[in-house]
Amino acid sequence: MQEMLIYGVSFDLVGKQPIVLLKTAEGNKFLPIWIGHPEAAAILMKLQSQSAPRPMTHDLLSEMLEQLGAQVVRITVTELRENTFYAQITVAQDGTEIEIDSRPSDAIALAIRAEAPIFAADRVIEESAIEFEGEEVDPDQLEAEVAKFKHFLDEVTPDQFAVEDEEEE
């Protein structure tokens, strides 16, 4: 298992599907996970230290856990099966830890709110991570791509992840 950091949220340029990009804490491996628009907005909103006027689902769940005396210990992206990522949320209450099955997007949105660490199984990283190392990578090109991505992250807003209704005919 390796600790992961949230590198950012972006869009798949072809399908306009949101992607959360996790980066290994040690090294240059990036794990792209395609997620839904509401979860992207929930993650992005917290990353940008914004809050909704009323609690969103992940805020509500976080508050409920706190009121019940439980805490999120960590979340783990556990496997990739048939192009679908799976995750677990580890919650501690009264000295007991329980594992709860979750979509990675929900687990990540909750981890941000709980300030809990994010991990990925080694096998998931081996199968799906993209590594930006090696002789074939042009450092200037990589730096330019990272700069463009960071600029996008600075400019994007949670509203851009809202799904618009189809145009009326």
Image (cartoon, rainbow, N blue to C red):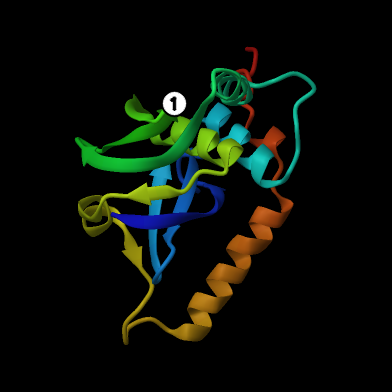
Report crowding for label 1: few under 14, some 14 to 19, many 20 or more residues within 10 A (C-alpha): some
Residue projecting furthest to the front: 95
The picture places residue 113, in percent across and down from the top left corner, at 60, 36
Residue situated in front as seen by the camera: 136 or 30: 30
Three-letter amino acid code of the residue under disc 1: Gln
Q: Is residue 169 visible?
A: yes
Position of 151 relative to 88 (above/below): below
Q: Residue at x 63, y 12 (%)?
A: 169
Q: Which residue is mark 1?
A: 93
Residue 119 falls left or right of residue 21:
left
* Residue name at image x 68 percent, y 38 percent: 45
Is residue 167 toward the left or the right of residue 102 in the image? right
Residue at far top of view: 169
- Residue 164, quarter of the rendered image: top right
The picture places residue 84, in percent across and down from the top left corner, at: 28, 35
Task: Give whichever of 136, 29 is nearer the camera.
Answer: 29
